[in-house]
Image (tube, helix red, strand yellow):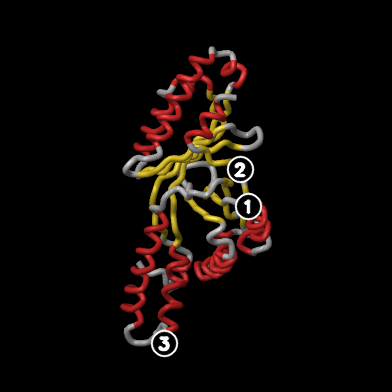
Amino acid sequence: MSQRPDTAEAESLAPETLEGWYVLHDGYTLDWAKWRSMPGAERALLIDELAAWTATAGTVEQGQSACYQMLGQKSDLLWLHYRSSPAELGAVERGLRSCGVFDYLVPSFSYLSVIEASLYEATAIAHGMLARKGITPGKEGFDAAFEAELEVQRAALNQRVFRDIPAQNHICIYPMNKRRGEHVNWYDLSIDERRKLMRGHGKLGRKYVPAVTQVISGSVGLDDWEWMVDLHSDDPLLFKKLVYEMRFDPASSRYAEFGAFLVGLKLDDNALRQYLAL
């Protein structure tokens, strides 16, 4: 469906999005006193069981999982799951609950969302590609050329929404909303105004690619905020630099509200075992 509004009424419609993996952020604190009071041999068996489950969950056919050690006191461990349906997320949740270590885990954070890509970007790229060829709105053949180019951009976006969990060693996650306040309301802007703001916002974010991988998942109707943002990088200082710089962008400075930030380190099998063996 074209994103070019033909009437004032059309301009107020919600922009089209592409959806991919469902995402579950599943965080816990560990009852360390109870955990340490267990005999070492029993604790070792539970560590083996959890490590084996985490490895199995991370190599499923329809999705992926990864485990992170979270810094600070908001969470100890976070499992990040990509799956093709809520039912599959439910199955992976039950898998963790079947592990003996779950008796020592206290839920601290969870978030349900679905990876999405707005066609703001695809539309802008399609217009730009055609403009470079001299094909502009109003010219004969523009509509057919636009739809064809938009499908090319859709295919590229489809690869992004069904992506792998980034391999970088650090993660920063936070939820966000667009303001709907008395004085500024993102949803009162026309689609052209929102497209212009997000085009500048995206250009700023692309300065940090590939050092930072950003994964945006929508959660309207699924959880408490409108989006969850996951940033992945091998250099955690870039999280601060990227978020700080984006605060000066109008799409954020005027219209964005942010929730709590959590930062963690990706754990492979050996690192998870070492963490739990403390």
- Mark 3 belongs to which amino acid? Gly
Label 3 to label 1: alpha-carbon separation: 40 Å
Which disc number belongs to residue 239?
A: 1
Marks 1/2 in contact by CB < 8 Å: the verdict is yes
Label 3 CA crowd tier, 10 Å (few <14, some 14–19, many 20+): few
Q: Give the x, y percent position of residue 266.
A: 53, 41
Residue at point 50%, 53% (across, down): 216
Of 40 and 15, the residue lying toward us = 40
The alpha-carbon separation of the residues under discs 2 and 3 comes to 46 Å
Q: Where residue 231 sits in the image (x, y, percent)? A: 55, 51
- At x 51%, y 18%, the residue is 43
Whether pointer 2 and pointer 3 mark residues with C-beta atoms closer than 8 Å, the reply is no
Q: Quadrant of the C terminus?
A: top right
Q: Position of residue 219 (x, y in %)?
A: 48, 47
Label 2 vs 3, first from the N-terminus: 3
Tell me if residue 39 comes above or below residue 276 in the rendering.
Answer: above
Q: What kind of residue is marked 1?
A: Phe
Say which element carries label 1: helix
**Count of numbered labels shown in the rendering:** 3
The image quadrant of residue 10 is bottom left
Q: Which residue is mark 3?
A: 134
Give the residue at mark 2: 263
Task: Specify few, some or many for label 1: CA neighbours under 10 Å numbering under 14, 14-19, or 20 or more.
Answer: some
Residue 159, located in which quarter of the rendered image? bottom left
Q: Is residue 254 visible?
A: no
**Amino acid tagged 2:** Val
* In contact (CB < 8 Å): disc 3 and disc 1: no
Q: Nearer the viewer, residue 187 or 61?
A: 61
Q: Earlier in the sequence, mark 3 or mark 1?
A: 3
